[in-house]
Image (cartoon, rainbow, N blue to C red):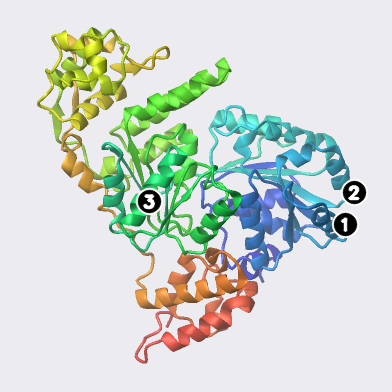
Amino acid sequence: MLSRKQQVLQEVFGFGSFRPLQDQAVDKILAGEDVLLILSTGGGKSLCYQLPALLMDGVLVVVSPLLALMQDQILGLESKGISAAMLSSMQSMEEIRATEDALRNQEIKVLFVAPERLNNDYFLSFLQSLNIAFFAVDEAHCVSEWGHEFRADYRKLGLLKIRFPDISIAAFTATATQQVEKDIVAQLNFKQRGNIIRGTVLRDNLYISAVVRQENGYQQVLNFLEKRTNEQGIIYVQSRVKTESLAKFLQEKGFQAQAYHAGLSPEKRKSAFNNFVGEKTNIMVATIAFGMGIDKSDIRFVIHTSIPKTIESYYQEIGRAGRDGLSSEVLLLYGTSDIGVLSRFIDAVDNEDYRQLAFQKLNTVKQYAFSESCRHQALSRYFDEDVEPCKTMCDNCNEPDTKRKDITELAQKFISTVYRTEQRFGQNYIIDVLRGAKTQKILNNNHDKLSVYGIGQNLSKIQWKMIGDRLLELEIIQVSDEFRGLILTDKARSVLKSEEKVDIRAINFNVSKKSASIAKKSTLPEYDFDEVIFESLRALRLEIAMETKMPAYVIFDNKTLQAMAYLLPTDKEKFLQINGVGEVKYKKYGEQFLALINTLRADDFQDPTH
């Protein structure tokens, strides 16, 4: 006999069993305890507060940072037959009053609000008139000043325990170091301080690679996309102008790409968002303004065209790929110029404590990008988890560094040029001096008269950048806090005296090989399904999505469609055995999909379930 909890899991959410740690988190919430769940993106955090809400009296109040994220989750809940609503500043007074009346009449099970609303005395008093099951704080890393997206309104959520001392709080995040998790628990005034459930950071379905960017990197992006013509993905760029430029470049190359940034009108942003989630557009070229509010499970790749500000934000952003658990790929294109751009942003902030922490985090990202060790291991260690090297799921492990190239002499030339130009210039300038460029700046500084001028003409600009990046990784040179130019560390003396050698992975020095390697990984399906049948199911899903004005992945995600295409269920009983199909979704869409499957079945097909 199934428990009520297992029944709801199966009938409403369509799953036969819980994922790791979900059961534990649900039980603590049902017991009325405060709990913090740290679970990687795609690990199923939302189910951990949605399911217990259905088993408890009263309304669940979810604190969420973005309007788009709220809208996305409301659509997902409604598709499962769960009444949900939100209260936001974007609504009219009539809409707000109607929602408040529905809450008083107990017609809403899940309410989404922004953290700012919980600092409003009227709203807090209104909440006190309701029967509240518990509070859920989504994206809880925003609570901590040590986190990467600290928000003052999140910091004030500690007042919930003051105004509602007997109501439990469940907090959720994908990114928290041990320092951040302790801060979250303390700031939210947990009664049970030890109720921290931490999942693994490891996303072993993601293939991670990082490549030195060549000039603007557009050709490298194109190389990566050539085998992904029918896949959806996100490309993150550093500025609004670059989103427009790269999107136009890709459109001219025949890709369905759109730009997304905060400078677009609300109508254009909404249209771009809807086109992407509705599968009319395959590629979203965006600033980091896009992504946090999307719950799309079948994104197959994420590309960063520059170094992100923090490891936390990078982990969040690559986490948008492969949320359905299927094989996906992420690529980071980077250059030392990124560090200078981000450093200037940090310098512009009038807060010394913030600057110090931001530079520390930026230095960690730099070391990650330049590193020759396992990418998955480096990310896990940052979040205080120790894992073995992945062996095959990142570029560094997939291209073992058995072949090394000694670049000590080249490193000495680079170091000497930094020293003779008085440690005041960035990497591009140093390389121009080494290669004998006749720029006006070099001529004005009389650096064309230096003994090091032109001594590196035999190497390309890209190769010299690799040498500079390697010296940064080994902390033989650093970026100055004062001028943002390169400066020498104590290690530089040992290299100049040939007491210490510098080497680099040989494949890194072969630019053509490295560039070609980024497009070799392909997405592997979990099921050996018929592509024609899968595409027919996708077409039906898109048709239903357009009719109902729902995002396609909310109806059924790609993993569920792949299972359908493989198992080809013949009746309701077999259809309900597929993960992601519950009673509610079967009633809404099941007969349409079964009818299509029956027309697609070949006469000689042997049912794999027999």
Q: Secondary structure at mark 1?
A: helix
Q: Is residue 105 above or below residue 565?
A: above
- Give the foreground label among 3 and 1: 3
Question: Marks 1 and 2, Cα distance to the nearest angstrom?
Answer: 8 Å
Question: Marks 3 and 1, Cα distance to the nearest angstrom?
Answer: 50 Å
591 or 456, which is in the foreground?
Answer: 456
Q: Is residue 162 above or below residue 84?
A: above
Give the residue pinned by disc 3: 248
Left or right relative to 407: residue 261: right
- The residue at 26%/46% (across/down) is 219
583 or 31, which is in the foreground?
Answer: 583
Which quadrant of the structure image shows residue 334? top left
Closer to the chain start, of discs 3 and 1, is 1
- The residue at 46%/46% (across/down) is 286
Question: Marks 3 and 2, Cα distance to the nearest angstrom?
Answer: 53 Å
Q: Is residue 228 visible?
A: yes
Left or right relative to 594: residue 61: right
Q: Is residue 24 visible?
A: no
* Badge 2 density bin: few <14, some 14–19, many ≥20, Cα 10 Å: few
Closer to the chain start, of discs 3 and 2, is 2
Query: Residue flagged by tag 1: what amino acid is it?
Result: Arg
Q: Secondary structure at mark 3?
A: helix
Q: Secondary structure at mark 2?
A: loop
Left or right relative to 239: residue 412: left
Give the residue pinned by disc 1: 104
In the current view of this chain or complex, which residue is farthest to the left?
Answer: 458
Q: Answer yes or no: do the residues labelled 1 and 2 have beta carbons within 8 Å?
A: yes
